[in-house]
Image (cartoon, grey):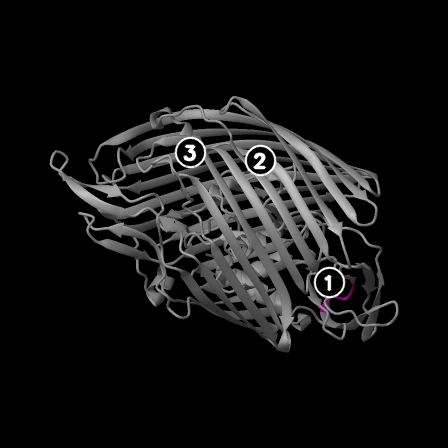
Amino acid sequence: MNAHRFFALAILAAAPQTLRSQTPVSGIVITTGGRPISGANVFDIGTLEGVITGEDGRFRLMLGDSATIVARKLGFVPAQKTISRSHPDSIVIRLERAAPVLTPITVSASTYTANEERTATLTPLEVVTIPGTAADINRALQTLPGLQQVDEGTGLYVRGGDSNETKVFLNEAELLNPIEIQSPNGTFMGSVDPFLVDGIVFSSGGFGARYGDALSAVVNLQTQRRPARRGMTASLGLAGVSVSLAEPVTKQVALRFATNVFDLRPLIALNGSSHEYQPAPRGRDLSGSIILNSRNAGALTIFGISKTNRLGVAVTDPSYSGLFGVDVKADLAVATWRAERGRLKTTIAGSAGRSENQEKYGAFQLDTRLGHTQLFGEADWIASQRITLRAGAEHHEVHALFEGSIPHSEVDLAPGSRTKVLGSDGTDVRSGLFAEGDFRIGQRLRLVTGARTDESDMTRERTLDPRVSLAFRTIGSAHITAAWGIYHEIADPLLSDDVLGNERLRSMRAMHSILGFQAGDNAEMVRLELYHKRYDDLTRQTRDYEVATNGEGTAYGLDAFVKATAPLGVRTRMTYSYVDSRRTDPNTGLIADAPFDVPHSITLVAQKYIKNWEAGAAYRYATGRPFTPVSGATFNTDEKRWIPSYAPPFSERLPTLTRFDLSLSNIRQLAPGWQIVMYGSVTNVLGRHNIYRYTYSFDYTQRIPVASLFDRALYVGASILH
């Protein structure tokens, strides 16, 4: 909830660069024939700060005494120009049309995902400027096609899959615990602050052999690179305070540091809430990076982060009403080395982390302690202009300890009820190998094919996952794409606890088939994708916390994405997702709608910049998710409580979810090199009373809706930046 700092940085970067430096640069980007090029990215190669050219091809930047600016657009050869202290008042950059070359076939959901090279796509800015995202990476990803809004949390439910089937990687290291607060209405916070990262790659399906242990989707985050100059940010808002520093010590060494403290008590006091908190959500995080660059040895980034979060929220249940409390502590350290020598590119990453999660609600009291280490290596060899070969390996150890008690039945949660006592302590070792070939066939076809194999101590089996994807260029920037692959994932370590009934589980399996069409570039784009997924060997818990295995399922659907500039220069984007997801119900063994089946999801975003003001609006619509209703109840005289009976699994749906959000920001210069940003946002402007789940009265005769945390929320803050 560090939106106070992120809104400020987003508006600063989106504002005219006159507030960030003392040297104005105006210019125009044209073709070799003299025609203006609109929608070209023009940016400082050292800082990645940039703008998009207008319809007349013109741009305006504010830079230091000297800088190298780059202009690039899809279909043209990038060009760069060095600007010195005595630069002309206006410069001209000419772009030459490029020979037809296929773009990378990463199956990503939209263009505000960045690839791993230094491009002008400032992904963190797009994360924080979308109204209603609260500057959260996961909430921004939820606005992309292929993701379903199942609850009001930050879980990534992709193309009919569960949120735990999406894996997050940071500098090539898997985030075993995404460091979130888990509340009854969903996860409360995302995993990583957006301005700690330099790029985000989201793959909604059909991803390559590099990634294992992921059944539905992957998110790859890269932390910030070397800062171009010394910088500082200090922020204060309704959610807390934050400070960040960046220091380029030498040409080879740079440091970054950030600390944030959030506390939602002021926000709740101003807006009120439909829930009672004790304590209100609060926490802190501390992070730092050491960045070492060497022309001969490559680049080494050492990143560390430590987080603590607490939450206590009142929950009403037929058998017990009390506080649901969660206390999370997590630490992670990642060292990543990258080097390029001739045609060989090498990446080696090592990580170590731990997390402690305490959850309490009535008879449910669970302490989870996870520790993990990981080593990853990959080598890419450019055999020719048309062939790239890559291979790699990873070794992952997870130590999991579970202590506490789980209620014997979900309908008897009160303190003193019968429980199942947990006390497991074990380690799983997973190793994987992968190889892949990237082939350009002629001028129009690109084929990527490969496979990976994984072995786990927990499952005691080796899996083999072949994968293939291709792209065919038709006319101009239009492509037809396709992908197919097999994917496996190991179940949550908790489900292998012998008390829950199954200490050996098979790897869950999915098969992806995807067919798509895409036309356009970063400024204007249309993308359509059809997909089908088949699931086998699924593992889930029943209502009474037992483990059900051998589940099956299917998911098919359509994703659509349109991005364009509307009249008056309003930047717009629209996403639509349709999905039909069905799985084995663990309680009955019947095939039914999946609990995260949300057939229709729509997101509309519009943004406009006027002088020093940035305004944005976002509208979200989602079909209500299915649930299994209670059809009746009988009184058990021995246990002295009501025992519910249930209708067919997932036979009813929650009401439709809709939300309209607004944001407005303004930036002013205080002194040379110093700026202040003031910002505000209103979430759920219309005060829609969205329902995310139902509970029942003690005898199950009355269904009680559980609403969102806030019907309408106003947020304000200010930041000083240098």
* Crowding at mark 1 (Cα within 10 Å: few <14, some 14-19, many 20+): many
Give above or below for 63 relative to 162.
Answer: below
Q: Which mark is residue 369?
A: 3
**Mark 2 and mark 3: Cα distance apart in space:** 27 Å
Q: Residue at x 34, y 26 (%)?
A: 499
* Side of 270 relative to 1 (left or right): left
Where's residue 165, x and y in %? 50, 41
Q: Disc 1 to disc 3, how far (Cα)?
A: 45 Å
Residue at (49% x, 66% y) in the render = 619
Q: Determine the secondary structure under disc 3.
A: strand
The answer to which image quadrant residue 98 occupies is bottom right
Q: Quadrant of residue 518?
A: bottom right
Q: Specify start and end residues of the magenta stretch as a single range.
A: 62-67
Q: Secondary structure at mark 2?
A: strand
| Disc 1 + disc 3, Cβ < 8 Å | no
Q: Amino acid at mark 3?
A: Arg
Give left or right: position of 665 versus 119: left
CA gap between label 1 and label 2 equals: 39 Å
Among the two numbered marks 2 and 3 on one chain, the one whose residue lies closer to the N terminus:
3
Q: Which mark is residue 43?
A: 1
Please identify, in this view, whether the residue under mark 2 or under mark 3 is nearer the observer: 2
- Residue where numbered disc 2 is placed: 487
Q: Which mark is residue 274?
A: none
Disc 1 residue type (three-letter) = Phe
Rendered location of residue 700, percent (x, y): 20, 48
| Earlier-in-chain disc, 1 versus 3 | 1
Helix, strand or loop at mark 1: strand
